[in-house]
Amino acid sequence: MNFKTIFKSLKNKDMLKRILIVVGLLIVYRFLAHIPVPLGEPATFQEAIQNLIEKSDFGSFLNLISGGGLTTFSILLVGISPYITASIVVQLITKAIPRLEELSQDGETGRRKINQWTRILAVPLAIVQSIAYIFILYQSVLASNTSLAYTPTTADWALSVTAMVAGSMILMWFGELITEQGIGNGISVIIFTSIISQLPTTMANLGAALFDTSAGSLSLFGWFNLPVNPVIFWVIVGFAIALLVVLYFLVKLNEAQRVITVNYAKRVHGNSSYGGIKSILPLKLIAAGVVPVIFATAFLSLPALIGQLIQTINPGNSFGATLTTLFTAPNASTFNTMYPDGITAQWFFYPALYFILVVMFTYFYTSIIFNTKEIADNLQKQGGFIEGVRPGNQTAEYLGKTINRLNLFGALALGLIAMLPFLTDYIFIVISGQPLGLSLSGTGLLIVVTVALENLRQVNSRALMVTYDEYK
């Protein structure tokens, strides 16, 4: 990564314009995240929202990707989860129906049609999810005996749902506008910004706990006392070391790649000769990036939402309770309630399913973004070939086998990284009888690192393009 080149590229008007557009869209997004849903007094929903976040992994995930839109009862409460769900559904259907798969390979025109279908499908999903969230929150407020200033009318419900759906569609639109600038995937950048926006609050809470000396201060070799909580201090030091180690391995895994040498046949046209050179085809260890983790988390979160909705409509329903229990990640706030007898087999259901889904989505998404047949055909048209492999179908088979071998290790590595917070929870349960509940923090860290590296890579590539003349 050449930061010197990136800084030089800022002198280019087009490059500067692209970056300013992305920054401007993100600033507008953060403003929108603080506009409340027009339904009564937003403050009355705070307690119900906190309960939703504590009891449901879906609530935590939703708050994460909406940049705190859930805790602020914002019009971005739904976030981009409808678009993510629509993308999963459309991509699954595309793989299942050969005609649609052919359309997806039909260049830019086919991809535009599929993207349009994804947007259309996201609208009804956003409507359904908006109604479900509003209904659950409203019933939770009533169940907590919180008095509302007034009883919402049908028009109030319609206005609130419309505002939330509009917020979700605006966020989807922002994502596409960011993608068009060519310096990062828009949806990933929005999720990245959402996670980063939570850091000031987290750091403030951590700082308050660190400097709370009511239980004593830290003695430094008996010479003097530091005005910090000794337990919190050593916990922070331990996590800082662990964070650096995890970040190191995350960067290494994200940057790891298999390089395949491609030879180009020498061709003579008149008095000029072409080809006769070598190039490389890099195959990333984790070509799918962070998308499998986002897909797996969103996929696992939906059953918990359905379970909560069933329990809200029909309190005491056993099916709804089972769904909520099975698809809620074990965390510090719910562990003693859900597992009064300690760790049972049920505790491993969510982590195991999460690991399996991450591995499956890694293979699935890689097969979408890395079309071996298309790459082999393009190499053949350009006169390129891999040494010892015939052009055409044999090249496609060779690339398919190679990417599958890489995927095996990459998918398992990605799954294990996603499982690290659960393993940490298990260790703390054995030691102290209580987990830390860092499941989504681990997911957030994985998303932040992967998206940051990918965006820097794209910015660096565009910077090289706009500063190319300076290096001639």
Image (cartoon, helix red, strand yellow):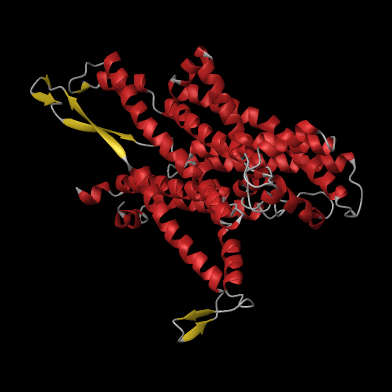
Direction front: furthest residue: 341
Quadrant in the picture for residue 27: bottom right
**Residue 312 shown left or right of residue 35 in the figure:** right
Quadrant in the picture for residue 436: bottom right
Q: Residue at x 31, y 44 (%)?
A: 465
In the image shown, does 426 or 251 lie closer to the viewer?
Answer: 426
Q: In this view, does 119 lie above or below 419?
A: above
Across and down, in percent, residue 359 comes to: 47, 32
In this rendering, does residue 287 appear at all?
Answer: no
Q: How many labels does the image show?
A: 0
In this rendering, does residue 147 appear at all?
Answer: yes
Q: Is residue 415 above or below residue 428?
A: above
Across and down, in percent, residue 413 comes to: 41, 39
Direction left: furthest residue: 271
Across and down, in percent, residue 370 comes to: 39, 27
Q: Residue at x 82, y 47 (%)?
A: 140
Q: Is residue 364 above or below residue 416?
A: above
In the image shown, does 298 or 378 lie closer to the viewer?
Answer: 298
Q: Which residue is drawn at 52% across and 49% down?
A: 421
Across and down, in percent, residue 396 comes to: 31, 19
Q: Residue at x 87, y 48 (%)?
A: 142
In the image shown, does 106 or 16 lie closer to the viewer?
Answer: 106
**Residue 387 shown left or right of residue 315 in the figure:** left
